Structures are given as structure tokens and as C-alpha cells.
Image: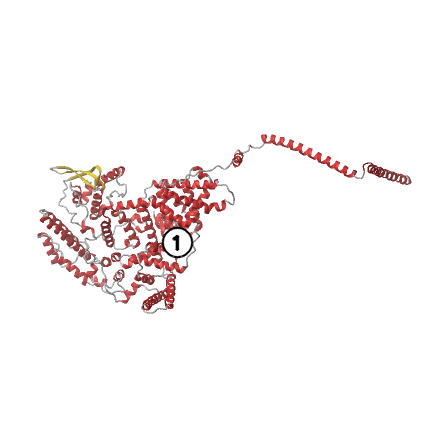
């Protein structure tokens, strides 16, 4: 069996071997025959044919697949996929078209002199902030033209809006109020720093922090600390503000274009506003500008030395000392002979003295041994003597003596002496007028004497009678003699001389008054204000010899000669009055409103009716009189407010007529008359059918109330909230009083001084401008907003940012020593231009401190930024009164941590009171 299998396997292998040999044999035979028949290139032809076959098949397959795929995709597109957006084909079509030219109207404001520099500013802005990078991306001009058109649209809307606004209230009221409030916040911040521990002397950072703490206390819901101290928050604020402005100024289509809006916003915020704010808030720039403004005035050597001696900045002193050393070295190197050597020696001695003073001051500051001049003089004991009669005729000295007398309870003696002086002057004037009228054949003897008698009786009742409180203590026989004279003789200007002389001797010799005043700190402060701590000779006011002080500060029986009338009050007499008509009159070019008052007076036996004509200023003067004489009326009677501009408008006159009628009806109520019986004299005089005599007279005007009437906590509100109603209508007087109040801190001083300053300013303005001052201010505001002035401002802006058409490079920060010397020069210039008359009115020390306070306020970049932003906010609120910009600014500033602290403090302080309730 195995043998058969083995044989069968061998036969199978043999067959396979013969088969393979036959295949190779036939293959080899075919190849040999092909080579013999076609030659040696048959292999290449065969390979070529095979390649062509394969390639043709591939091409046919590709073409067939593409055709079928396109048909299939077309079917799918109509059945499954959404339709293609029409914007893409339209965009492609627009791109294929030729670029069309865009025409831009170069008119912006309607004034060619403004449009030309404005177009240059736009061109320079696009060139330096957009084109330099845009051309690296594209050569298409349309985008740049669209940006230019957008900017022009915004400027056109801005110009149109500006023409519709009355800028007079902004320039005459808002700016001054904002500046005065800023100065008040700074002054209160300085006071807070001073009240802290002397050992922990406040730094500049402490002052800035305290400033914004005071700001939020005053503004309640606004604090600008983040915008002024954080560059990141400041840029965000400007971006938000610019976006709001673009929303108001641009057409809706342009504003909705985000790319365009963002470009314009960044150009305005970072390219224009931020650099401008940086420059305006730079203390060194402000100092240079101050020096440039008063460049015509010469520096005063005394003022310069005062600045050096009072400086508490070591950097300033070192800068001056180094400059003095440099000049010394130069002068010593000169080779001079003859007369020049004496001049150089004098210069060297002066420089050595300056250097010595600087070194001494630096050592004192570094050692911390600062000397208070007033305390040093008080402890030293050897002070110059100012006689009492000189004190009584000098404005500055009198206010300190008045404060001292109030502390010691002797104010009645001083006010009596001053009131008698006023009575004497007024009586002499009245008698002189009486004599001149008698010479002219006019007889008014009884009326004048009656007025003099009433005024004299008023003084007697207020200071010498048993009902007087406080009462002047003099010999009884002198008081009895005076009373007998008043009852039986006509009063004369000298009727009070004997008692006045006794009161003067009492103030001079009584240890409670003048002798104690010379040992008091107020006396030393008085000498400092008079600049007499170093000079023993008394230098009074230039006009002090002829100065007299009239009236009584108490104001309870301040009877002016002009205020007294012979009309007696009777309970049976009924008086009714109302304004029946209103008109506008023109007198010698001066336009004013006139109110016709119809008056009915009924008594038991008769009835009368007449018409009298009064101006608003007559109502105002009358209101001033009765509220000063009857203090309770000031809280009951409210006179309609004044309006300086556009006060001839018909609607406004009708509204004022209605308000004045309400004022009259309240005044004439029986309850009002019974509460103040003496009020009837003033009312009858005002409503009588005759020309109204304005002015309360010098006798009653001179001295204000002893206790000033102020609202609660007036220091924690804006300046405008505390303005005196009696001066609102006179813009220049209002401005000067507001600034003087804050610069020299007059509201913290004696109110008698403030009234004297007010009277002096009134006289100065009337003597300089007369009654045309308001018209001049209107003309000046119109001139400031005229096309010529606006064009000049635009040109200055253009030249400052692009001098000679080239973008200004960032100005390198000047050397610290140069900046310090500029500060010293600026302070010296400011002190040099202060008139001596001002020092005589409010005191040399107060003047010096006030000027240096204002200058110091400008030496803090963060505080300057705050003031710039306040002015900007006021400008936008005036430009867009219909929009709620105030609420917008409150929201933009609401992230301040100072506001959160203030609210937490309020909650903490209010919690106990709520728990009690």
C-alpha cells in the first residue's frame, strides 16, 4: 500500500515538472519568434500600448464621474441645502465694478474762516492716525473718504447745535461756579490735612485722596477719582463719552457701522481729547501759561524773598540755590574794572543772601523744626503798638478788634461808636442838602428834622434805653441829658458826641477791651495781616483817614433816614393792591420792565384808589429793606428770582407779574400786618403814588447783621447754592465776590469785612462801567463765541498739535530743577501783581495765603484733570440740555470706591436714628 502511494506521488511530481518545462519552452519560443519577427524594440512598443490603455480608461472614468457628480449635487442643492445668501454675489459684483469717486462737501459751520482750519485738522488727523497703517493693507481710498465724511457730519451737527445755544449763562455763571466749587473742595481738603497729627505730615497722595473724599461729601453722588487717577478708567470714560456724542451727532446709518464708529471714536478719544486733557492738566504747562499771561509785570524782589521764606518745598529751594550758585560762579569768573565792579559786587552779595536764605530754609525743613511766625511773635512779647484810633479807621485791623469785642461781650460799645460815626456823617449830609434847598427857595425843614429825630431815637432805643439788649454802660446823667435833648431840641450831628467820647475812653482804658486785645492772639494775627511783625511802623489804609463805618450789626432797629416816613398805621385802614398791567419802557437807551400797581385804601370815612408804577429793582430794594428790619419775614416772603439776560421776554414778564402779585397778596394779609405793626410804614411808602426812592441809605447799609444768616452746613454744597440774592443780577460783582469768597476764605471771616468788600466792588464797577456793565459782558460773550474767535481757537489747536503741518512730537519732560524754578517764578509773579489796595482791605497775610492756595491747587495733575472734566461736563450739559447728561455722568462715575464708602458711612450714621424711631 505504501509502495503504491510512493509510486503515485513520484509520477505526479514528474508530470508537474514536464508541465512547467513546456510552459517555459513555449514562452521562450514566443519571445524568440517575436524578436526575430519585430526586432529588439518590441518590448517598448508593448509597454507603451499597455500605458495608453490604462491612461485612457482613467480619463474616461474621471469625465464620466464628474458629469454624474455635478448632476447629483445640483439635485441635492435644490432638495437639501438652504439657499445661498444674496449678499455674497452682490458683494462680489460690487468688487468687480470700478471704484466710483465720492464727492465731499467741505462746508462745516457756514463760516469759511472756521471751515478752512477745521478741514486741515481733519486731514492731519486722518493722515497721522489712519493712513500710515491703512495703506499697508489697501490702496482703496473709499474707506478713508467715508471716515472723513463721518467726521464732517459730526462736526456739522455740533456746529448747528452750538448756534442754537445761549452761551452767556455758561460763561458768566456755570464756569465760575465750577471753578469756585473746585477751589472750595481743595480748601476743605487742605483743612482736613492740617487737622491731622503734625507728626504725620500729609503727602501729595494724601491730599489727592482727601480731595476726592471731600468731593463726594459735597457732590453726594459723583466722584471723579477713577477718571483722574487711573489711565485705564480715563480711556474707558472718554471712549464711552465719545460713543454717546457720536450717537447724538451722526446719522443712524453711520452710527450703526461699527467699524467706522470705532475708528472715529478712537481718533476722538485717544488722538484728540486725551492729548488735549494731558496738556491742560500738566502743572508745568499751567505755570508757564501763568507767567506768559502776566509777562508785562516786573518781578518784585520783596515778593521773591517772601516766596523763598514761605516755601515748604525742598525741591524749589534747592533749584533756586543751585541757580544762585551757578550765577555766583559766573560773576566771579568775570574780569571787570571800574564802575562795573561795584555792580557785580552788589549782585554777588544779593546772590549770597539768597543762597543763605535757601540753605537756612532747607535745613529747617529737613530737621522738622518749622517755626510759626505768629506764635513766635506772640511768645516773644515785643510787638509794635497800634493805637485804638488807628484800629477803628482801618478795615483790616477793625475786623480783628470786632472779633475780640464779641468774644468779651463788649460788642455793643464798638457798634455804638461805629453807629454814631455813621449817624454823624449822614446827618451832616442831610443838613447840607437842607441848606442848599433853602437857598433855592425849597422848604423841607420839618421832614428832614423828623427823619433825623427818628434816626437818633432809633440809636437811643437800641443802645442806651433800659430795653436795649445788650446795653451800653455809661453814666446815667449823660443818658438822661441825651433823652432830654431828644425830647425838647432838634437833633444835630454832634448830639451823641459826649457819650461817644465816654465809650471810646472805656474801650481804650478798660482792661477787658483794648489792653486785653493787645495781649491776645488776635492782635498778633492783626499785625501779621498788616505786615507789621517785622516793621514796627503802622501802615494803615490809604483811605482809612476818611473812612467811617455806619450802621449797627444787630440790625433790629436799623432805621435809615430814607426809610422813615410820616405815615402812621391804623388798624381801621385796609389796604389792597395788585399788579394790573405790565409794560416795557425805554429810557435813554436803557430798556426795563414796568409794573402798574392798582392800590385801594379804605378807612371808616373815605376810600381811595390810585395807580403807581414800579420796576422789579424797586421790588428788590423794598424786599431788602423789610427783610433786614423784620428778620422773621425772610423765611416767609420769597421774592421772585432775578434774570439777567432775556428778561424782556413776554412770557417771562407774565410769569413774573403773577409771582409778584402773589408776593403782594401775602405781604398785605392782616395777619402779616398785625405780626409786624411797623411794617405798614414801609408798605405805604412803597405803594404811594410817587417816585420810589431806592437805596436803604448809607446809614443802614454799612454794617450787616452780627450773626450772618446762612443755610445749614453751607460748606458742604456747591458755591452757587450760597450766593447772596442781592448780587445775583450784577454779573461782574457776583463773579468777583464768589472768587474772593473762595480764594481768601471770606465767608469764614467777619461778615462786616465781606460787606465792606462788596460796597467797594460796587463803587469800583459803577465808577468804571456805570450801568452798562451787563451789556458789556453780553458783548464780550458774543465776541468770544464769534466766528473770528472760534477760528482763532481752532488755529491754535492745529498749530499746537501739528506745527508746520507735522504731528508734534511728545514734548520731553523738562528738568526737575527748571520746573521748580518755574513754580517759584509763577508764585512771585502772582504776588507781585496783587494791588496794595487789596492788602489794605483784607490784609497782607490773607492775600498772600489766598494767592498761594490757588497756585498750589494747580500743582496737582489729578486735581487739574478733575477741573478739566468738570468744565467738559458743564459744556456738554449746556450744549445738549434736552438729554440727561447729568444722569449719564453719574452712572459713568458710579464705580468710584469713594462713593461706596460715603454711602456706607451714611448708612452707619443713620442706623442709630432709625432704630430709635
Give the left or right position of residue 125, taking residue 300 as reference.
right
- Left or right: residue 795 versus residue 12 is left
The quadrant in which residue 855 appears is: bottom left
- Of residues 637 and 119, which is closer to you in this image? 119
Q: Residue at x 28, y 67 (%)?
A: 380
Position of residue 744 in the picture relative to residue 23 (left or right): left
Relative to 512, say whether 126 is above or below.
Answer: above
Image location of residue 369, percent across then percent down: 35, 65
The 10 Å Cα crowd at callout 1, few under 14, some 14 to 19, many 20 or more, is some
- Where's residue 225, x and y in %? 40, 51
Query: Is residue 905 among the parts visible in the rendering?
Result: no
How many marks on residues? 1
Residue 582 appears anywhere in the view: yes
Q: Nearer the viewer, residue 576 or 173?
A: 173
Residue 182 x %, y %: 34, 51
Question: Which is nearer the eye, 465 or 498?
Answer: 498
Q: Is residue 534 above or below residue 89?
A: below
- Residue 321 found in image quarter: bottom left
Q: Residue at x 46, y 43 (%)?
A: 262
Q: Residue furthest bottom?
A: 337
The extreme front residue here reads: 338
The image shows residue 780, relative to residue 48, as above or below, that is: below
Q: Quadrant of the N terminus?
A: top right
* 2 sits to left or right of 596: right
Looking at the picture, does residue 146 appear above or below residue 834? above
Quarter holding residue 577: top left
Can you identify the residue that label 1 sits on? 282
The secondary structure type at the circle numbered 1 is: loop
Q: Position of residue 299 (x, y in %)?
A: 31, 59
Amino acid at each position: 500500500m505504501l509502495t503504491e502511494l510512493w509510486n503515485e506521488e513520484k509520477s505526479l511530481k514528474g508530470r508537474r515538472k514536464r508541465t512547467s518545462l513546456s510552459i517555459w519552452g513555449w514562452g521562450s519560443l514566443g519571445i524568440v519568434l517575436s524578436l526575430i519577427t519585430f526586432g529588439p524594440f518590441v518590448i517598448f512598443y508593448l509597454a507603451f500600448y499597455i500605458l495608453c490603455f490604462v491612461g485612457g480608461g482613467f480619463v474616461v472614468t474621471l469625465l464620466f464621474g464628474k458629469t454624474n457628480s455635478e448632476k447629483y449635487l445640483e439635485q441635492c442643492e435644490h432638495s437639501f441645502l438652504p439657499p445661498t445668501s444674496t449678499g455674497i454675489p452682490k458683494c462680489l459684483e460690487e468688487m468687480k465694478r470700478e471704484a466710483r469717486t465720492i464727492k465731499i462737501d467741505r462746508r462745516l459751520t457756514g463760516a469759511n474762516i472756521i471751515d478752512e482750519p477745521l478741514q486741515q485738522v481733519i486731514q492731519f488727523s486722518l493722515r497721522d492716525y489712519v493712513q500710515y497703517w491703512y495703506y499697508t493693507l489697501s490702496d482703496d481710498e473709499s474707506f478713508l473718504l467715508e471716515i472723513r465724511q463721518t467726521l464732517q457730519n459730526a462736526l456739522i451737527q455740533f456746529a448747528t447745535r452750538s448756534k442754537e445755544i445761549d452761551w452767556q449763562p455758561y460763561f458768566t455763571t456755570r464756569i465760575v461756579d465750577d471753578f469756585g466749587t473746585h477751589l472750595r473742595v481743595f480748601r476743605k481738603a487742605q483743612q482736613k490735612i492740617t487737622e491731622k497729627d503734625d507728626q504725620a505730615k500729609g503727602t501729595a497722595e494724601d491730599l489727592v485722596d482727601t480731595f476726592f473724599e471731600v468731593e463726594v461729601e459735597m457732590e453726594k453722588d459723583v466722584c471723579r477719582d477713577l477718571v483722574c487717577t487711573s489711565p485705564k478708567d480715563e480711556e474707558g470714560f472718554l471712549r464711552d463719552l465719545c460713543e454717546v456724542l457720536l450717537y447724538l451727532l451722526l446719522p443712524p446709518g453711520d452710527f450703526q457701522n461699527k467699524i467706522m464708529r470705532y475708528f472715529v471714536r478712537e481718533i476722538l478719544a485717544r488722538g484728540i481729547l486725551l492729548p488735549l486733557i494731558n496738556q491742560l492738566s500738566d502743572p508745568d504747562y499751567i505755570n508757564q501759561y501763568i507767567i506768559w499771561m502776566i509777562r508785562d509785570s516786573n518781578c518784585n524782589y520783596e515778593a521773591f524773598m517772601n516766596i523763598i521764606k514761605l516755601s515748604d518745598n525742598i525741591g524749589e529751594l534747592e533749584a533756586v540755590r543751585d541757580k544762585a550758585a551757578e550765577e555766583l560762579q559766573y560773576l566771579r569768573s568775570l574780569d571787570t574794572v571800574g564802575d562795573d565792579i561795584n555792580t557785580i559786587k552788589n549782585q554777588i552779595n544779593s546772590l549770597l543772601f539768597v543762597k543763605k536764605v535757601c540753605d537756612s530754609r532747607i535745613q529747617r525743613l529737613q530737621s522738622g523744626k518749622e517755626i510759626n511766625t505768629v506764635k513766635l511773635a506772640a511768645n516773644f512779647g515785643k510787638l509794635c503798638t497800634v493805637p485804638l484810633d488807628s484800629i477803628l479807621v482801618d478795615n483790616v485791623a477793625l475786623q480783628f478788634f470786632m472779633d475780640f469785642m464779641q468774644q468779651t461781650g463788649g460788642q455793643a460799645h464798638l457798634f455804638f461808636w461805629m453807629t454814631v460815626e455813621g449817624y454823624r456823617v449822614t446827618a451832616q449830609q442831610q443838613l447840607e442838602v437842607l441848606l442848599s434847598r433853602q437857598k433855592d427857595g425849597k422848604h423841607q425843614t420839618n421832614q428832614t428834622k423828623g427823619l433825623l429825630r427818628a434816626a437818633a431815637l432809633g440809636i437811643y432805643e437800641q443802645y442806651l434805653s433800659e430795653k436795649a439788649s445788650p446795653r451800653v454802660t455809661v453814666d446815667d446823667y449823660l443818658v438822661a441829658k441825651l433823652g432830654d435833648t431828644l425830647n425838647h431840641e432838634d437833633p444835630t450831628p454832634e448830639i451823641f458826641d459826649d457819650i461817644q467820647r465816654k465809650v471810646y475812653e472805656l474801650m481804650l482804658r478798660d482792661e477787658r477791651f483794648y489792653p486785653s486785645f493787645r495781649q491776645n492772639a488776635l492782635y498778633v494775627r492783626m499785625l501779621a495781616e498788616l505786615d507789621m511783625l517785622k516793621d514796627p511802623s503802622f501802615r494803615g489804609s490809604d483811605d482809612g483817614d476818611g473812612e467811617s463805618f455806619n450802621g449797627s450789626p444787630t440790625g433790629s432797629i436799623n432805621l435809615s433816614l430814607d426809610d422813615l416816613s410820616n405815615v402812621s398805621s391804623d388798624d381801621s385802614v385796609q389796604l389792597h393792591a395788585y399788579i394790573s398791567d405790565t409794560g416795557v419802557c425805554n429810557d435813554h437807551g436803557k430798556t426795563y420792565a414796568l409794573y402798574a400797581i392798582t392800590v385801594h385804601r379804605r378807612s371808616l370815612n373815605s376810600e381811595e384808589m390810585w395807580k403807581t408804577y414800579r420796576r422789579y429793582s424797586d421790588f428788590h430794594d423794598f424786599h431788602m429793606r423789610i427783610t433786614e428790619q423784620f428778620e422773621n419775614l425772610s423765611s416767609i416772603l420769597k421774592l421772585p428770582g432775578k434774570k439777567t439776560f432775556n428778561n424782556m421776554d413776554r412770557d417771562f414778564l407774565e410769569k413774573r407779574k403773577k409771582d409778584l402779585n402773589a408776593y403782594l397778596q401775602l405781604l398785605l394779609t392782616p395777619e402779616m400786618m398785625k405780626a409786624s405793626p411797623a411794617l405798614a410804614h414801609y408798605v405805604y411808602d412803597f405803594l404811594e403814588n410817587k417816585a420810589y426812592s431806592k437805596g436803604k441809605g448809607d446809614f443802614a447799609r454799612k454794617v450787616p447783621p452780627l450773626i450772618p444768616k446762612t443755610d445749614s452746613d453751607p460748606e458742604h454744597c456747591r458755591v452757587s447754592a450760597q450766593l447772596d440774592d442781592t448780587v445775583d443780577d450784577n454779573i461782574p460783582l457776583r463773579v468777583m465776590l464768589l472768587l474772593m469768597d473762595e480764594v481768601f476764605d471770606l465767608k469764614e471771616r467777619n461778615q462786616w469785612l465781606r460787606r465792606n468788600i462788596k460796597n467797594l466792588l460796587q463803587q469800583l464797577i459803577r465808577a468804571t462801567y456805570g450801568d452798562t456793565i451787563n451789556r458789556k459782558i453780553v458783548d464780550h460773550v458774543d465776541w468770544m463765541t464769534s466766528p473770528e474767535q472760534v477760528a482763532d481757537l481752532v488755529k491754535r489747536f492745529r498749530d499746537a498739535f501739528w506745527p508746520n503741518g507735522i504731528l508734534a512730537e511728545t514734548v520731553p519732560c523738562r528738568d526737575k530743577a527748571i520746573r521748580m524754578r518755574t513754580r517759584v517764578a509763577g508764585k512771585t509773579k502772582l504776588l507781585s501783581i496783587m494791588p496794595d489796595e487789596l492788602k489794605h482791605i483784607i490784609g497782607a497775610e490773607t492775600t498772600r495765603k489766598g494767592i498761594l492756595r490757588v497756585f498750589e491747587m494747580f500743582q496737582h495733575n489729578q486735581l487739574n484733570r478733575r477741573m478739566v472734566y468738570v468744565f467738559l461736563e458743564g459744556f456738554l450739559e449746556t450744549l445738549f440740555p434736552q438729554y440727561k447728561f447729568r444722569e449719564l455722568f453719574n452712572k459713568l462715575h458710579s464705580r468710584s470706591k469713594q462713593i461706596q464708602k460715603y454711602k456706607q458711612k451714611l448708612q452707619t450714621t443713620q442706623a442709630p436714628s432709625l432704630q430709635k424711631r
